Image: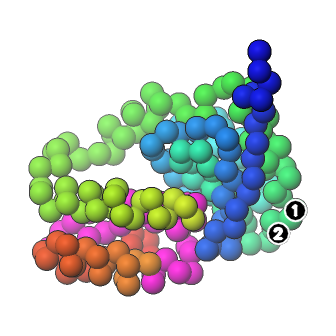
């Protein structure tokens, strides 16, 4: 038996948002999906892993995607105070072999909160396609996610998650980058705004 594959390594990366830190793991945590918990109440049974992170002192937000977790800290804490405990918790939880995400609960909540009509609108489909191909890969590198929320009367509403939530440079990314690209590629788009901005 090779022990090299059982070693769990975790390293942290700074993000453009000084209140958020990205913790990269050599394991897939939530393959090709993301889940955002902007506060402890948002977990709602969807992740024992996230619930445990919120119990650590100074944790304000948890965002899980692919092979990383982006953690938001409270203003009264410094990263050097809480990083060792965060890394130890992540390593210990993964070693336990317990599921990070309760997929049944996630599906239940999605079913309750999603509109019943399917994505039949071709403009919405184009917007989602652009986000998936051009925006998501770039923002995930910085520990965040930008997700589609709504399209109405030429206005696209996006949700900022992980390191993108509250990031000082998110307005520039949104207006100069995403809005410009969408206006060029989808002429019906007049403006792009962020939810809760």
Q: Is any atom of residue 57 visible in this view?
A: yes
Residue closest to the far top: 1
Label 2 sits on a secondary structure element that is loop
Q: Which residue is mark 1?
A: 81
Check disc 2 and report the residue beneath it.
Answer: 78
Q: What's the residue at 33%, 58% (across, down)?
A: 133
Q: Position of residue 106 (x, y in %)?
A: 45, 36
Q: Which residues are magenta?
A: 143-172
For the rendered model, the colour scheme is: rainbow
Viewer-proximal residue among 21 and 136: 136
Q: Does residue 137 appear to the left or right of 71 in the view shown?
A: left
Res 62 visible: no
Magenta includes 166? yes
Task: Check the picture and name the quadrant holding the C terminus.
Answer: bottom left
**Label 1, label 2: how far apart the Cα atoms are:** 5 Å
Horizontal side of residue 9 vs 169, given as left or right = right
Q: Toward which corner of the image does residue 50 lie, by quadrant?
A: top right
Give the quarter of the image for residue 158: bottom left
Which type of secondary structure does the marked residue at label 1 adopt? Answer: helix
Q: Is the C-beta separation of discs 1 and 2 under 8 Å?
A: yes
Left or right of 60 in this view: 87: right
| Residue located at (21% from left, 66% from top) | 151
- Local crowd size for mark 1, using a 10 Å CA cut-off: few (<14), some (14–19), many (≥20): few
Whether the magenta-drawn stretch holds residue 158 is answered as: yes
Identify the residue shown where x is 47% and y is 30%: 103
Q: Closest to the observer: 87 or 116?
A: 87
Residue 1 in percent (x, y) is at 77, 15
Badge 2 crowding class, 10 Å Cα cut-off, few under 14, some 14 to 19, many 20 or more, is few
């Amino acid at each position: 038996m090779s022990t090299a594959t059982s070693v769990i390594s975790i390293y942290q990366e700074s993000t453009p948002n000084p209140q958020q830190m990205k913790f990269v793991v050599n394991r897939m945590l939530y393959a090709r999906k993301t889940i955002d918990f902007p506060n402890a109440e948002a977990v709602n049974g969807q992740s024992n892993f996230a619930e445990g992170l919120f119990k650590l002192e100074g944790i304000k937000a948890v965002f899980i995607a692919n092979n990383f977790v982006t953690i938001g800290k409270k203003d009264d804490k410094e990263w050097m105070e809480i990083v060792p405990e965060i890394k130890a918790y992540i390593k210990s939880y993964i070693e336990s072999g317990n599921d990070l995400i309760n997929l049944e609960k996630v599906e239940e909540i999605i079913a309750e909160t999603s509109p019943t009509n399917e994505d039949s609108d071709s403009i919405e489909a184009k917007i989602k396609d652009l986000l998936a191909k051009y925006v998501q890969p770039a923002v995930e590198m910085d520990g965040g996610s930008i997700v589609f929320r709504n399209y109405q009367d030429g206005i696209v509403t996006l949700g900022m998650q992980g390191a993108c939530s509250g990031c000082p440079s998110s307005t520039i990314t949104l207006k100069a980058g995403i809005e410009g690209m969408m206006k060029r590629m989808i002429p019906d788009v007049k403006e792009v705004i962020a939810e809760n901005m």
